[in-house]
Amino acid sequence: MKKDLSELALCDLLGIRFPVIMAPMFLVSNEKMLIEAARNGIAGAIPALNYRTTDELRAAIRRMKTEAQGPIGINLIVNASNFLMEEQLQICCEEGVDFLITSLGNPKMAIEQAHKTGIKVFCDVTDVHYAQKVAALGADAVIAVNSQAGGHLGPTSPGELIPAIKKAIDIPVISAGGVGNREDLDRIAGYGADGFSVGSIFIASDEADVSNEYKQACVDFGAKDIVTTTKLSGTPCTVIRTPYVKEIGTEQNMIERFLNKNKRLKKWVKALTFYRGMQRLRKAAFGATYKTVWCAGPSIEHVKSIRPVAQIISELLHGKA
């Protein structure tokens, strides 16, 4: 049974027609995709780390503010691996983005600084405990990252995670993971979700600048081909199990595991692992070869062709014509 999605809280939070955020995807999300999201009644967000320099980030925000007819979001990694976080946060506040999505760390500074300029902050969480912590810090909403998410994922199914968080906090809960079509939206709304963060189905879009091989992989592979790896960032991350991924494996080697457990070295090892993973993903996203590592979630099961963002949004919200 289809629900009236316009009644969900995310619509009011961001002033959008439909309660969907095109999720920030490392090296996939771009300005063209965000502008198309806004034109079609949803919001979009881009990882700050998609820009090599903070000057590039500032220029991109200014371009999007000129062209996008809707809210602009930036995703910030707020742990020690992101050496540019404070500068990225300052730029977002100075340029006046509409919302921030914080990931992989303590969002206290981001919430405090963003709220001074009226910017909303949504925090990625994977469990009730962390949801309560960020709610206490003043987050405007949480993004409940479940076990069906693409990229960095949580351990809990949406059917368990969303009701548990809804019971524990009194701010909106946006679900991330497990949405590939309208039926998924209605099912997860039934768990109590106040909105949705949807990413993987947009990889195979005309507007995405990644390689055609990456896009085609999202068409050719399905949910059964998604595996988790710790090789990219040290944190479990979902990727497509291409022949190359089968060859290199998905677990950190013995030396990497030892260094990650060493308290004195852990911070720097995680930062180095994250950096190496970023470089590997950068090469994978734009390289024309199957010898790559491509992030995606199980919702690629619903990707049957490479299409414009506008068509993907229409089919997601209304079903295929």
Image: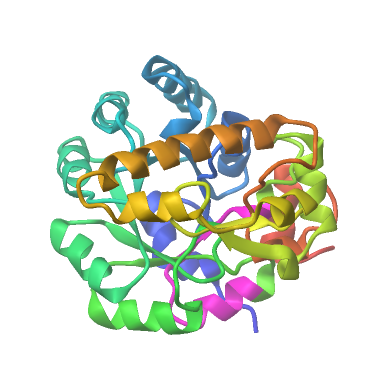
Residue 190 lies in the magenta stretch: yes
Decide: is 236 above or below 92: below
Residue 197 lies in the magenta stretch: yes
* Residue at the image position 70 percent from the left and 30 percent from the top: 286
Image coordinates of residue 130 in percent, x first then y, are 25, 67
* Residue at the image position 45 percent from the left and 77 percent from the top: 156
Image coordinates of residue 36 in percent, x first then y, are 63, 38
Decide: is 256 above or below 251: above
* Image quadrant containing the C terminus: bottom right
* Image quadrant containing the N terminus: bottom right
144 displayed left or right of 282: left
Numbered disc total: 0
Q: Is residue 132 visible?
A: yes
Image coordinates of residue 118 in percent, x first then y, are 22, 40
Of 275 and 87, nearer the camera is: 275
Of 87 and 242, nearer the camera is: 242
Of 88 and 2, nearer the camera is: 88
* Residue at the image position 77 percent from the left and 37 percent from the top: 206
* Residue at the image position 36 percent from the left and 54 percent from the top: 258
Decide: is 245 above or below 31: below
Q: Is residue 74 visible?
A: no
Decide: is 42 above or below 59: below
102 displayed left or right of 311: left
Image coordinates of residue 126 in percent, x first then y, are 37, 67
Q: Which residues are magenta?
A: 184-201
172 displayed left or right of 212: left
